Image (cartoon, rainbow, N blue to C red):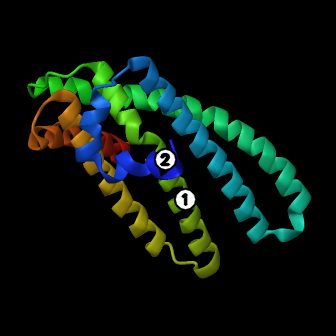
């Protein structure tokens, strides 16, 4: 798959996710979550080195040595986090969709969610880097924050489409199936 193809499912979910569903595999979905986390971890580590060098160029040697260690740790941790988070998120999608009449399988949910995980992870990391650059140069968090929120809403839309296709339910039911756990998590985070 070329670089453009890596992002295709993210940009054209309604057209490409049904094709992906035909290839659904739980193990391949798990591997794609691991790869998504590793890629995001690597890019995050490299961009972390760049931010450090922008903020403190005099620390070049230490930034490079620490950055290489940071990249290794970031790749490992992000791969684990994406594997666990993707699996748990897919299970929650499956469960709530089932409660709303869904007919899909956990395998379908894992595989379709993993189809756009890598591309969205890369873009989230890049947006985070842009946010940091804006903060360092202007001390204004709002442009980066707004960009992050807009992209997060778009990824939420893609996840609704994914849930709809994986569970063979309408977009409205998929939206409700995704919204309920999201609201619960937000309330819990705010409460604690």
Residue lying at 73% horizontally and 38% vertically, measured from the top left: 72
- How many residues crowd mark 1 within 10 Å: few (<14), some (14–19), many (20+)? some
Q: Counting residues from the N terminus, which is met first, the one under dot 2 or under dot 1? A: 2
Q: Residue 150: x and y, percent? A: 34, 63
Quarter of the view holding residue 79? top right
Q: How many marks?
A: 2
Relative to residue 55, is residue 173 drawn left or right? left
Q: Residue 55: x and y, percent? A: 75, 70
Q: Residue 65: x and y, percent? A: 86, 49
Q: Nearer the viewer, residue 191 or 84?
A: 84
Residue lying at 37% horizontally and 59% vertically, measured from the top left: 151
Residue lying at 15% horizontally and 23% vertically, measured from the top left: 98
Q: Quadrant of the C terminus?
A: top left
Q: Which residue is mark 1?
A: 126
- Residue 174 lies, with reference to residue 155, above or below; the image says above
Q: Secondary structure at mark 1?
A: helix
Q: Residue 158: x and y, percent? A: 29, 47
Q: Which residue is mark 2?
A: 121
Instruction: Give the Cα separation between the discs numbered 2 and 1.
Output: 9 Å
């Amino acid at each position: 798959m070329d670089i453009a193809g890596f992002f295709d499912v993210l940009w054209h979910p309604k057209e490409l996710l049904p094709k992906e569903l035909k290839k659904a595999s739980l193990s391949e979905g798990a591997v794609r979550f691991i790869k998504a986390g590793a890629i995001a971890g690597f890019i995050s580590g490299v961009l972390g080195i760049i931010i450090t060098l922008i903020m403190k160029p005099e620390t070049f040697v230490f930034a490079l040595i620490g950055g290489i260690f940071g990249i290794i740790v970031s790749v490992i941790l992000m791969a684990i986090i994406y594997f666990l988070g993707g699996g748990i998120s897919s299970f929650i999608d499956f469960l709530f969709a089932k409660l709303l009449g869904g007919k899909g399988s956990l395998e379908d949910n894992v595989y379709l969610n993993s189809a756009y995980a890598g591309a969205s992870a890369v873009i989230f990391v890049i947006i985070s880097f842009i946010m940091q650059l804006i903060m360092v140069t202007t001390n204004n968090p709002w442009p980066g924050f707004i960009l992050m929120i807009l992209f997060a809403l778009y990824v939420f839309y893609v996840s609704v489409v994914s849930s709809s296709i994986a569970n063979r339910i309408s977009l409205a039911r998929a939206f409700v199936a995704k919204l309920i756990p999201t609201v619960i998590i937000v309330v819990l985070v705010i409460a604690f």
